[in-house]
Amino acid sequence: MATETAPKTIKRLIACCDGTWMDSDNGYEEAGLLRKEDSLQIPSNVTRISRCFEKRCSDGKLQVVNYESGVGTGSNVLDSITGGAFGMGLAERMRETYWFLCSNYMDGDEIILVGFSRGAFTVRSVAGMIGNLGLLTREGVEFFYPIFKDMQHWMDDDYEDPFPNIPFSNKPKGKDAAEVYRARLEQLGYTRALALDETRPPFTPAVWERLPENKYTTDLRQVWFPGNHGNCGGGWEDQGMSNITLAWMMDQLASIGVEFDLPALERCFFQNFKFYHKTPSKLSLKSRKRREKTKKRQWAINPIYENNRPFRPWGLGTISKAPGLLYKLSGQTVRTPGLYRPTDRQSKCDKSRYLLDTNERIHSSVRIRLVCKGLGLNDDHVWDCSALLSNWKLKRTREKYTDPVPFQPGWCPNGGKDHMGHPNDWSKGRWVWEYVGDENDGPKEARQRIMVEEPLGPYERYLLNLSAGSPNVYHFADTINS
């Protein structure tokens, strides 16, 4: 009698790589050179989203999560400085993340990579390794370190290989090295090739472009939000703005089948409501100073301010400027949405043309914050969003656009119920940002002169339902805009 084989369980492997100085494995920060008092670490969005995945999806698929702390999270000050300033430890994180995937992947499994700050660089590099090498088999993993070093130095003719015969001799070099190297690994049974559809959201300031030959194979989504690096990626005590980006990330992942645990999401969202109502004695020293500084300053126009304080509704949370000598030494660069150019790898100089098909969009929280007169960095002034308004102007249009998250998607965090209705009301047209800058130096193609406002997905609408305030800031802004 033939023995029945157990049905194969398809897995979704989710690798989450955190940003500089972020360590969810520890979660505690001691007082020292870089901080004045002991405290619990405020989790980043990578940490928070890693805690929100369902273990098993509704279709039976397992979701297996691996979390990697960021660089600069060692046990001493030297590691904090070298990791934070110079990114030391990145290669180790790349190897550990790649090893997790090699150890757990079976044919048919899905791979999801999530990263913030230098963690975004880590997962992008891991995606490149998978694209170049595939995933090493158990036999191939034994030679992982020499293979990793070979890949790092394919374009370096001066590199002296300490392992010239491992995993094989006469190793290829140059621009075609990846293809030849992978083929030889496959012949030896050291790797398996994968067909990888890569969704690459922008976790770093570098803007991507989608080349014409990749138009139907690469799903590129890039959205601009209010705030600085930490407001978008998380880690500040006021998580009002990072909640918005967290909900957006969830919608992007849900659109490709990832499922989340709703109670875990609600805990994330409600923690910020509690923060606004904390007494000063329960706040960190930094937050106490800021609250004292801004207690007489309105953070929105009336009636939004009077009806909701101390709680700051959706889109109006604090946006903070990171302190510290390391950041001051790095200088300042004003972002230029829609106006980035490709950089020559050798000369590091910008090329003359603008990036093609970047699919850059502006999140609706930008419009709400501007209309409601939210505050700028460190609550010092009314937010003017100079990075955007210096070259772009808001308007409505009757043009139709295709959105990565459909108008009525097949997922909803509240059992299919949407108690708010649908805030993406396009009966009067879509909000877009039109280029109005210098015509002599501006983009020439029509598609490059418009950035569409990103519509809200189900998880974003759920967050808006919890934190819209009274009156609802989204509807209030639409009334003022009209």
Image (tube, grey):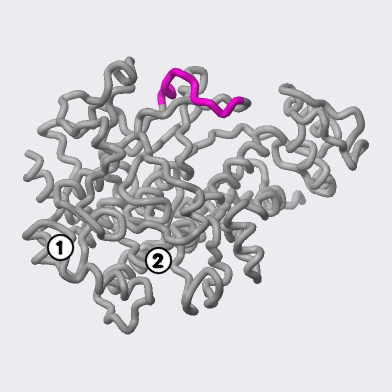
Q: Tell me residue 160's x, y (percent).
A: 87, 36
Task: Report crowding for label 2: few under 14, some 14 to 19, many 20 or more residues within 10 A (C-alpha).
Answer: some
Counting residues from the N terminus, which is met first, the one under dot 1 or under dot 2? 2
Q: Nearer the viewer, residue 320 or 399?
A: 320
Residue sitting at x 51%, y 60%: 55
Q: Amino acid at mark 1?
A: Gln
Residue 357: quadrant of the picture: top left
Query: The residue tagged with tag 1: helix, strand or loop?
Result: loop
Please, is residue 251 above or below residue 216 in the view?
Answer: below
Q: Amino acid at mark 2?
A: Ala
Q: Tell me residue 451's x, y (percent).
A: 29, 30
Residue sitting at x 37%, y 40%: 334
User: What residue would you read off at disc 2?
Assistant: 264
Task: Report crowding for label 1: few under 14, some 14 to 19, many 20 or more residues within 10 A (C-alpha).
Answer: some
Question: What segment carries the magenta color?
Answer: 347-357
212 sits to left or right of 106: left
Q: Main secondary structure of the magenta part?
A: loop
Is residue 305 a member of the stretch shown in magenta?
A: no
| Residue 432 appears in the rendering | yes
Residue sitting at x 23%, y 62%: 466
Q: Tell me residue 312's x, y (percent).
A: 21, 63
297 sits to left or right of 77: left
Query: The residue tagged with tag 2: helix, strand or loop?
Result: helix
Residue 298, label in figure: 1
Q: Quadrant for the C terminus, please.
A: top left
Q: CA distance from mark 1 to mark 2?
A: 32 Å
Residue sitting at x 42%, y 45%: 332
Q: Tell me residue 89's x, y (percent).
A: 67, 55
Q: Nearer the viewer, residue 198 or 146?
A: 146
| Residue 4 appears in the rendering | no
